[in-house]
Amino acid sequence: MFVMRLLAALASTFACANAVWIDLNNTESIHNASSLVAVGLMDYYTGLQYGETIGMFSDPYYWWEAGGAWGCMLDYWWYMQNDTYNDIIMQALLYQVGTHNDYVPLNQSTTEGNDDQAFWGIAAMTAAERNFTNPPSDQPQWLYLAQAVFNTMALRWDTTSCNGGLRWQIFMWNTGYDYKNTVSNGALFNLAARLARYTGNQSYVDWADKVYDWMYGVGLISNGNSRFVYDGVNIAHNCANITGYQWSYNHGLMLSGCAYLYNMTKDEKWGNRTFEYLNSASIFYNNSVLYEVACQTVNKCNTDQRSFKAYFTRFLGVTAELIPQARDQAMKWINASALGAAQSCSGGYDGHTCGINWFYDGWDGMYGLGEQMSALEALVNTQALNRPPPYNSTNGGSSTGDGAAGTEESPTNLSPLDITAGSRAGAGIITCVIGISILSCALWLIL
């Protein structure tokens, strides 16, 4: 019994010695704290292990969240000026590009959704905007990759139902093919806005308008001075039934997309929308501390949802960089959330494992990739105003691209795969032939 108590005391002492602590007026404390949280995040990365896939994290984290995690690590590098993981980031982002350099790799090509692809494209766009080290000349460049994702997604715009919009899934056999969700369409809007600002190409502004107007028209965006964003809509009944869940990452996609467009165009339409989304973002805060309102209050956040705060904080930080009038409110929320996140990162064997509940006094016992990502974004975005805003092609961005990226050859998976009756019949015949052949071989071996 004495030995057990001694070990527990030692573990507690070790944890306290490694717990995350920050002082918002002490930049070194932010650097030290974010370094510990980043180590915890990378503990979930398996891509460097023998037999594992480069770019992927451990189960149960899906491919899309890996793309989100690399975007998080790009923010860590940029705001903390810490290049410890840069080679790993570049290796991961380039390994998963796929045959056509559009982030439709073969290992995901039958299960990938539009939102999955988008989060890798968003990571590539972030690399371009932050002037992350450009890939070798024989590899696709960051801007090219973001454009390829945008182009292949835009080519899937579906007017066969609900007058437009992207379906959640690319392939008709996947659950969600009959659902048009905000994250897929909001990500297309977000990419269009960022590509517009980076390249100066009006066609991206036109696409952003098109996507936004469709989302508003179908009811995924509410009207009024405080705009709310809803999860999605089923195509049945011409998209009349809205799924009303409000997720922070959907809100952030729309908020920052409007901020990018306002920064570029100076059009008051986008400025007004930016502040409408900023005002309504208060739904995700309690005493200025961020929480995932749709699931966290009832302790029902699943693996994906536990990472949503990371993306929202990222989008809120860039909004503050782009729109000076938004800075006071955005930084108030970011700083308060960072303090809450830091005190939650005091658990686990390492003493700096982060929890999901930033109101709780200490670690709440929850842990995972999403928790580490969310805490890391909260910490590093406290420095959002101490670094330059996103670059574009005229003020420091050096990444190159191509307006036709992803479509030069036969693009992969541009439209939902439609299996005709003839195809099904042919597949059935082939299946029967193969089955008979296997049965014949088995009988031959027995006889």
Image: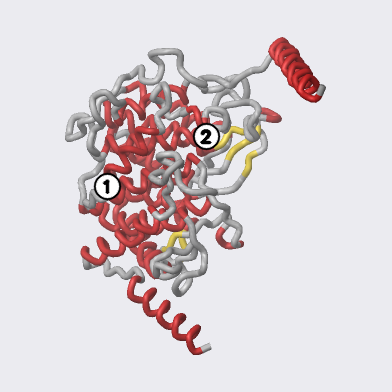
Residue at 55%, 38% in the rendered image: 220
- Residue sitting farthest toward the front: 447
Question: Given the image, on which type of amino acid does mark 1 rest?
Answer: Glu
Q: In this view of the protein, which residue sits in the foreground, 31 or 353? A: 353
Circle 1 is placed at which residue position?
Answer: 321
Q: Position of residue 32 (x, y in %)?
A: 26, 64
Colouring of the image? secondary structure
Q: Residues within 10 Å of mark 2 (few under 14, many from 20)?
A: few
Q: Quadrant of residue 101?
A: top left
Left or right of 48 on screen, residue 24: left
Could you tell me if residue 417 is visible in this image?
A: yes
Q: CA distance from mark 1 to mark 2?
A: 26 Å
Q: Quadrant of residue 350?
A: bottom left
- Circle 1 SS class: helix
Q: In this view of the protein, which residue sits in the foreground, 218 or 153? A: 153
Q: How many marks?
A: 2
Could you tell me if residue 239 is visible in this image?
A: no
Q: Residues within 10 Å of mark 1 (few under 14, many from 20)?
A: many
- Circle 2 SS class: helix
Q: Is residue 144 above or below residue 433?
A: below
